[in-house]
Amino acid sequence: MNHGPVQPPDLVIFDCDGVLVDSERLVVDIDVEMLAALGRPVSREEAVELLVGRSFADIGADIAAHLGRPLPDGWDTEWRRRVRAALDAGLTAVDGIEAALDALAARGVPMCVASSTGHEGLRRTLGRTGLHDRFAGRIFSAEDVPRGKPAPDLFLHAARTLGVPPARCAVVEDSPHGIAAARAAGIPAFAYVGGLIPAPRLAGPGTTLFTDMRALPALLGL
């Protein structure tokens, strides 16, 4: 069922990993190995639930709270190195996203990125997939706000910076944390279920589920 806005939005806010770039499939096994090395062994499914859509800062705080002790300095250095190597070796754009972006651009719909990934990582992944120039000057990171997803801060920051009321925006996400952030911000959410997260974890109020990025413009009313 389509719960999205009746009229086309004035701004479409895209998550990055799993929405624009197909990164999450490449790194989930690395995530499992690194969590185990830090003393928090989890299954592949648990790693997806814990990590997808969150910043490294929030992940580190969660692990430290779980263990009841601070993590060692530089705990994320090897993790980041291995993730970069995996992305450099095999990262591609999400299937159908370029057609969707072309259709939105042809209609003159403003777009931006709001991601839990840091700015350096966003430059790397968006640049490697040829998508960076489409969003240049309109790329927002969890580094820019006090609280990352599932708090609404990042989406509200992007909407405010670009001068669009939250209710006139649309968020495209693929993680429960991102969908929760959109709901908390009062922004209609479009949940892409072509990735690692099962549809029931994304379904809920104010949320349209879809499986093909090429269908996004029509779902947005364009």
Image: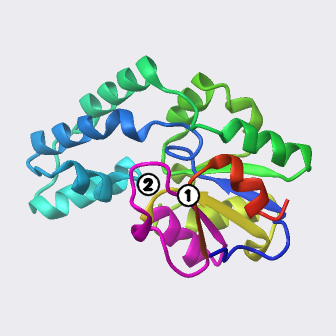
Question: Where does label 1 land, which residue?
Answer: 173
Q: Is residue 174 magenta?
A: no
The residue that appears at 75% across and 67% down in the rendered structure is: 169
Tell me the crowding category of disc 2: few under 14, some 14 to 19, or many 20 or more residues within 10 angstroms, Cα based: many
Q: Amino acid at mark 2?
A: Gly
Q: Amino acid at mark 1?
A: Glu
* Residues at marks 1 and 2 touching, judged by CB atoms closer than 8 Å: yes
The region drawn magenta spans: 177-206
Query: 169 and 94: which one is in front?
Result: 94
Q: Is residue 203 left or right of residue 28?
A: right
The residue that appears at 50% across and 42% down in the rendered structure is: 118
Q: Quadrant of residue 84?
A: top left
Q: From this viewpoint, is residue 137 visible? A: no
The percent coordinates of residue 96 (x first, y second) are 65, 39
Q: Quadrant of residue 97?
A: top right
Mark 2, secondary structure of its residue? loop
Q: Mark number for residue 65? A: none
Question: Where does label 2 land, which residue?
Answer: 53
The percent coordinates of residue 142 (x first, y second) are 52, 53
Of tags 1 and 2, the one toward the viewer is: 1
